[in-house]
């Protein structure tokens, strides 16, 4: 654990450096341990050997050419990928309802934006996953330099990454996969296939489902393009080393026998929940994203009842369905409480 060991070493030194709190917690005492580990070693654009080694080890775990740790969320990863492969005046293809960082990245690169639509799944009130059939007309009629897709969708619908990558290869354009909500995928074959080993660039948010701190994330690339140069344009020169160390430890945990056991247990419990709630309908391709509906209630009604009567807050709701996110930190106790609540609602309504 390269970065973790670095912080342990520096916590024993007398540092006459930034940061100005000097590792003392006189402002916010509840974060005492964080202050002790908050050092100013170097910046992420020219990392010292320990950060290089940590990122190199991560790339080996994921089986990619390069992995970079991000401490400004997946948004910074998307912007990095676009800046690395798109030049001013190039055309970039984006989903018109994608996260704002997709268009922001294109604007920063000076690219010409072309957007595509994704149909809604009426029965669930959410967008479907993008398909190669949706993208193909644009690649056929425009000279597209890069395509950004969101997979999985917020609600857990996953695209056929291999098929889309084959299409992009045919038309000589880069594929950037926004896999912010799929950071667990490389660590279980019971979840949708990850884009990590397929797309040219894949961006993942560790904090969304994989147990990471806000706003830790990763960018992976299978190209020879210099993503460090792109990162130089947007990253701070004063990164948080506690956050960087947490990324390293997070990946190590997910790749360990203990982490995989925890993930499998979560999936087992969610599969049992689905079996034990036969009157509740479940949608999506990703079991860790519980997209649910009860035909006797609207999505908003179900959400309101869960919140007001059972103290359960969902992630997102629409007139048809309700979304509850279950990251790797979701406890058995929480799943049991949801099971009790859902069956109680079925009995009452």
Image (spheres, helix red, strand yellow):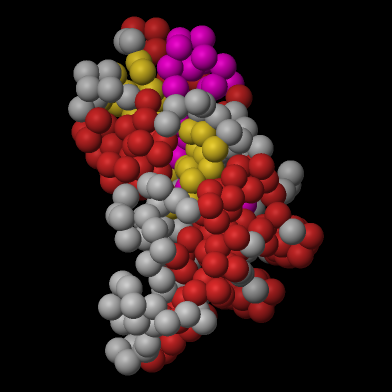
Q: Is residue 280 left or right of residue 148?
A: right
Task: Please name the residue shown 40% across and 52% down the image.
Answer: 44
Q: Is residue 345 left or right of residue 41?
A: right
* Residue at the far top in the pictured view: 141
Task: Examine the rendered structure and indicate whether residue 230 appears above or below residue 269.
Answer: above
Task: Give the mark count.
Answer: 0
Q: Nearer the viewer, residue 318 or 70?
A: 70
Task: State the image quarter where residue 61 is shown.
Answer: top right
Task: Please name the residue shown 65% across and 74% down the image.
Answer: 331
Q: Is residue 14 left or right of residue 328?
A: left
Residue 124 visible, this angle: no
Which quadrant is the N terminus positioned in? bottom right
Task: Examine the rendered structure and indicate whether residue 298 appears above or below residue 219.
Answer: below
The spot of residue 49 in percent (x, y) is 53, 52
Q: Is 4 contained in the magenta span?
A: no
The spot of residue 318 in percent (x, y) is 39, 54
Identify the magenta region: 163-185
Q: Nearer the viewer, residue 327 or 51?
A: 51
Residue 20 visible, this angle: yes
Task: Please name the residue shown 45% across and 12% down the image.
Answer: 172
Task: Please name the residue shown 40% across and 39% down the image.
Answer: 228
The spot of residue 292 in percent (x, y) is 55, 56
Task: Examine the rendered structure and indicate whether residue 147 appears above or below residue 71.
Answer: above
Task: Examine the rendered structure and indicate whether residue 276 appears above or below residue 121.
Answer: below
Which quadrant is the C terminus positioned in? bottom right
The spot of residue 197 in percent (x, y) is 62, 33
């Amino acid at each position: 654990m390269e970065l973790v060991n670095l912080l342990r070493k520096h916590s024993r030194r007398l540092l006459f450096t930034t940061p100005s709190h000097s590792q003392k917690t006189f402002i916010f005492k509840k974060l005492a341990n964080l202050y002790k580990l908050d050092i100013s070693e170097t910046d992420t654009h020219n990392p010292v050997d320990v950060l290089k080694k940590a990122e190199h080890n991560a790339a080996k775990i994921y089986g990619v050419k390069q992995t970079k740790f991000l401490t400004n969320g997946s948004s910074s990863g998307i912007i990095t990928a676009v800046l690395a492969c798109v030049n001013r005046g190039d055309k970039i293809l984006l989903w018109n309802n994608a996260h704002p960082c997709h268009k922001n990245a294109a604007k920063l690169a000076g690219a010409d934006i072309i957007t595509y639509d994704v149909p809604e799944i009426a029965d669930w009130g959410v967008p479907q996953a993008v398909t190669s059939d949706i993208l193909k007309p644009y690649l056929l009629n425009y000279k597209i330099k890069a395509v950004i897709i969101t997979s999985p969708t917020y609600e857990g619908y996953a695209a056929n990454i291999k098929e889309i990558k084959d299409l992009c290869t045919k038309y000589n354009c880069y594929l950037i996969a926004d896999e912010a909500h799929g950071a667990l995928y490389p660590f279980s074959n019971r979840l949708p296939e990850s884009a990590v080993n397929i797309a040219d660039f894949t961006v993942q948010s560790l904090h969304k489902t994989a147990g990471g701190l806000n706003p830790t994330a990763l960018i992976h690339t299978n190209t020879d393009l210099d993503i460090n140069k792109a990162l130089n344009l947007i990253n701070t020169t004063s990164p948080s080393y506690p956050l960087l160390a947490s990324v390293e430890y997070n990946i190590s945990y997910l790749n360990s026998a203990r982490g995989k056991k925890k993930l499998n247990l979560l999936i087992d419990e969610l599969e049992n929940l689905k079996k034990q709630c036969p009157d509740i309908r479940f949608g999506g391709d990703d079991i860790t994203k519980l997209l649910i509906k009860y035909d006797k209630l609207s999505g908003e009604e179900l959400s309101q009842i869960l919140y007001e009567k059972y103290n359960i807050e969902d992630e997102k709701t629409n007139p048809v369905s309700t979304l509850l996110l279950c990251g790797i930190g979701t406890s058995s106790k929480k799943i049991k409480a949801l099971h009790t609540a859902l069956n109680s609602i079925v009995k009452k309504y």
